[in-house]
Amino acid sequence: MRVAVELLLLLLGVSQGLAADCDGRINKTRCNVTVGETLFLRLANNASEIPKFDLQKGQSILLRWRINATVTNQLKDRSDFIYSNGTFRINKVRPKDGGEYELQIFGSDGIKKETRYLHLSVQAGEESLKIGVIAAVACFAFCLFSLMAIQVLRKKQKVKEEEDPDHLTYADITIAQEPGKRQVKQKLEEEVEYGQIKSSG
């Protein structure tokens, strides 16, 4: 039962973890996110460090930043770029958000200085978590029901033992001889012995 409770708490905790952090400041970073979560993709310590950049997936430019202003944001209905800490936030991640990303960084002169790559894996979403929670609750209920059934059977057995008239009770019995009977036996033995002696003489 303890295992079922721990599993339930773990699944409930996972289902409440609604945000994922990914550090895009490191080249070839691999990030995992669950469908429906909010992704915080860190591109720089501060946007002032990067005067110009393009974040693209495949041939599509998702985010274009040019000197303190967002020029392009294809996910604007569910995302925004946080200038102060250089983080691109994507709300309610979808399966199609997964894949290879490329961050092209330009100097103030417009010349490309650096290219970073990022791989984003989008894992099963809320439906799988709900199924896991339901399974944990079912397991917990089964364990609880089993324990209650065992307790009921034990109580019934105890009541049956108390009510059963054929219930065996063991006792130690010791047979003691009466003193008078022992003396008679000794007299008979003596007479027999005396008779034998008398007949032999």
Image (spheres, grey):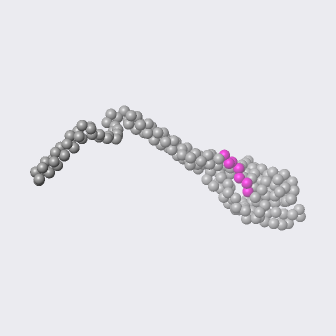
**Extent of the magenta region:** 16-22
Relative to 35, is 134 on the left or the right? left
Relative to 139, is 33 on the left or the right? right
* Residue at (12% x, 49% y) in the render: 198
Is residue 173 visible in the rendered image? The answer is: yes
Q: Residue 104, position in %: x, y? A: 79, 63
Q: Nearer the viewer, residue 153 or 190?
A: 190
Q: Nearer the viewer, residue 148 or 77?
A: 148
Relative to 115, is 195 on the left or the right? left
Image quadrant in which you'd find residue 106: bottom right
144 inside magenta stretch = no
Q: Residue 195, position in %: x, y? A: 13, 48
Q: Residue furthest right?
A: 109
Q: Residue 187, position in %: x, y? A: 19, 42
* Residue at (76% x, 65% y) in the render: 27
Image quadrant in which you'd find residue 67: bottom right
Q: Residue 19, position in %: x, y? A: 71, 50
